[in-house]
Amino acid sequence: MRLVVLMIEVEQPEGLSTRKLVLETARHNVITAYSTPVGIKLLRRFPNVDVVVLHTELEDRSFKQAIRELKNTRNDMPVIGISPRADRDMDGADYMISSHDPHALLELLAERFEATTSDQGDE
């Protein structure tokens, strides 16, 4: 299954482009935002988003506050937190993974959301 993923993070452009490339290579649709307010606007505009990927090191909000705002917009929305710190508390995220391993994101999406993992047609 192909997913629509909303990515909200401040790591521009290297961190985002790596994760985005991995997901797009697996044929997922990726919408990007560089701030929480823009991410929330996109979530309202594109209600078919399957999952939000949210970086813990936001500049405009605390991670916990950003999750609260996303869940207030759509409370059934799964949120995956990505963090450079392995010991990071989940602070309301449904899942937490390392931001240094873009393939871990793909593996989590496959395991929890039955998402495709490659461009080889494993839909």
Image (cartoon, rainbow, N blue to C red):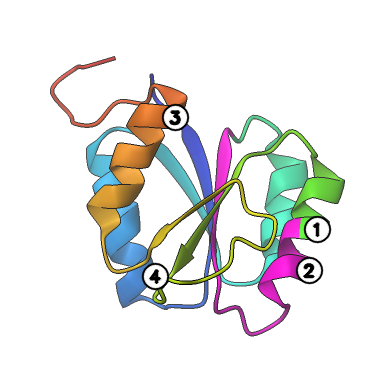
Q: Is residue 61 magenta?
A: yes
Magenta stretch, residue numbers = 50-67
Check disc 3 and report its element: helix, strand or loop: helix
Q: Quadrant of the C terminus?
A: top left
Quadrant in the rendering for residue 19: bottom left
Q: Which mark is residue 68?
A: 1
Q: Which residue is mark 2?
A: 65
Q: Name the front one of labels 1 and 4.
A: 4
- In this rendering, would 30 be left or right of 122? right
Percent x, y of residue 40? 74, 56
Quadrant in the rendering for residue 54: bottom right
Q: Which of these two is toward me, 44 or 92?
A: 92
Q: Name the front one of labels 2 and 4.
A: 4
Instruction: Check disc 1 and give the amino acid type.
Output: Arg
- In this rendering, would 4 be left or right of 21? right
Query: Which of the two labelled residues, at mark 1 and mark 4, occupies the earlier sequence position?
Result: 1
Tell me whether the residue at label 3 lies in contact with that at label 4, contact meaning CB atoms closer than 8 angstroms: no
Q: Which residue is mark 3?
A: 112
Query: Which of the two labelled residues, at mark 2 and mark 4, occupies the earlier sequence position?
Result: 2
Q: Name the front one of labels 3 and 4.
A: 4
Q: Is residue 65 above or below residue 27?
A: below
Badge 2: few (under 14), some or many (20 or more) residues near its Cα, within 10 Å? some
Q: Which residue is mark 4?
A: 86
Q: Is residue 38 magenta?
A: no
Q: Which mark is residue 92?
A: none
Check disc 1 and report its element: helix, strand or loop: helix
Check disc 4 and report its element: helix, strand or loop: loop
Percent x, y of residue 78? 62, 40
Tell me whether the residue at label 1 lies in contact with that at label 2, contact meaning CB atoms closer than 8 angstroms: yes
- Give the distance between the C-alpha atoms of the residues marked 1 and 2, in whole angstroms: 5 Å
